[in-house]
Image: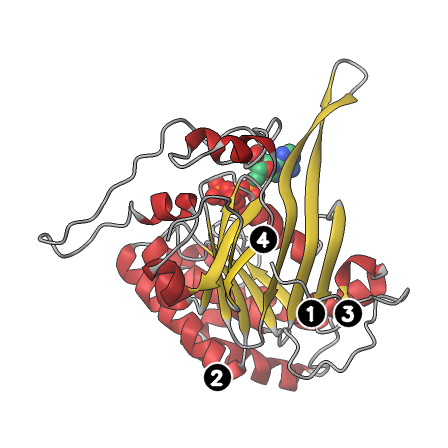
Amino acid sequence: MTEQVVQPLSNGKVSKDLNNRPILEVRNLVKSFPIRGGILGREVGAVKAVSDVSFTINRGETLGLVGESGCGKTTLGRSLLRLIEPTSGDVIFDGIDVTKLNPEDLREIRRRMQIIFQDPYASLNPRMTVGAILAEPLLIHNLCGDKESRLKRLFQLLDYVQMPKDTLNKYPHEFSGGQRQRICIARALAVEPDFIVCDEPVSALDVSVQAQVINLLMDLQKDLGLTFLFIAHDLKVVEFISNRVAVMYLGNVVEIAESKELYGACRHPYTKALFSAIPNPDPTAKTERIILEGDIPSPMNPPSGCHFHPRCWRATEECRKTYPGVTSSTATHQYRCYNSLQ
Ligand SMILES: Nc1ncnc2c1ncn2[C@@H]1O[C@H](COP(=O)(O)OP(=O)(O)OP(=O)(O)O)[C@@H](O)[C@H]1O
Ligand SMILES: [Mg+2]
């Protein structure tokens, strides 16, 4: 939600001194999925899954991304890597506008931008050994040419994720969910990425295993200087792992701030409602519980004005009419609300 302007050149490169620049700058990103109907399959509408989203991620930090199911988190994460083609907007990664790249340059950028998915069961080919799974990205990107250096690299990858050497000869079904997710992390690390989208990487795991995988990700981030976009439903996990957190509602980022500030003093009523659902371990503490009425509206037909207004207890006439612009309360805290808290 920052207002810096970067002018991409026709080849996608950006001519700027990139020192102190964020590693990722997302500007006015939109992704609409067409809805087709009738026997001719004509376009009868569109789902605006991501709607005018702008934010930055600094090198080496973790930006958490939270919001109700269907608000567009996965679509946003995948659009950054162009695994889903954005409808409009810019994704500037280390000075290069990813949305303007030709397939060959995109391949090189994809080496530096990786993704880890929620389901470690579905994301590993059951017919390949772990060795073949980890070697695949090395071969695709022409890294580690000879067999010996490749094997050395595979052992190093297993070492990163604390798995034994004999893992290489086994198949994914021989491992537990947590171990499979470690293998997925090793596969993402194989190509030496700078930035990883972690799309609910621990949601499918037992709570005790979740903590191990999160600690592993945090250690790897420190050791390898990685930058994360960390998507999750568990707000406590996001608070623990993230430097800053963005809150999404119906395709928009409605609030973004440093983790401490957001959890301590959020401005947007939706953030407040979302966070009020976090259980407090202190039974004597008085926490205001806000129960939102109604379901999240359909992104096919979003409400007028602020999309949150039909569920908001602070909504005014203005909220019903026009979508709020970005307000900054501090350099690191932005929100979209006419009638904010505090
Ligand atoms: N390929 C697609 N075609 C049409 N609509 C889609 C497609 N993918 C996602 N959507 C729609 O876009 C919206 C956002 O979906 P998305 O999966 O990004 O949400 P999410 O925040 O990741 O949800 P969850 O928390 O359940 O993973 C939803 O309304 C979804 O139905
Ligand atoms: Mg998702």
Q: Earlier in the sequence, mark 2 or mark 3?
A: 3
Question: Which residue position holds label 4?
Answer: 326
Label 4 CA crowd tier, 10 Å (few <14, some 14–19, many 20+)? some
What percent of the width, then of the height, locates residue 327?
55, 55
Task: Tell me the CA gap for discs 1 and 2.
Answer: 19 Å
Q: How many numbered discs?
A: 4
Direction top: furthest residue = 39
Direction left: furthest residue = 284
Q: Earlier in the sequence, mark 1 or mark 4?
A: 1
Which amino acid type is marked by label 2? Answer: Asp
Task: Tell me the CA gap for discs 3 and 1.
Answer: 14 Å
Q: Earlier in the sequence, mark 2 or mark 4?
A: 2
Q: In this picture, is 19 found above or below 248?
A: below
Q: Earlier in the sequence, mark 1 or mark 2?
A: 1
Q: Nearer the viewer, residue 162 or 81?
A: 81
Task: Tell me the CA gap for discs 1 and 4.
Answer: 33 Å
Residue visible at 46% across and 77% down in the picture = 220
Quadrant of the snapshot with the N terminus: bottom right
Task: Tell me the CA gap for discs 2 and 4.
Answer: 35 Å
Mark 3 and mark 1 residues within 8 Å of each other at the beta carbon? no
Q: Secondary structure at mark 1?
A: helix
What percent of the width, then of the height, locates residue 97?
78, 64
Question: Which residue position holds label 2?
Answer: 223
Question: Which residue position holds label 1?
Answer: 111
Task: Tell me the CA gap for discs 2 and 3.
Answer: 25 Å
What percent of the width, then of the height, locates residue 273?
35, 43
Mark 2 and mark 3 residues within 8 Å of each other at the beta carbon? no
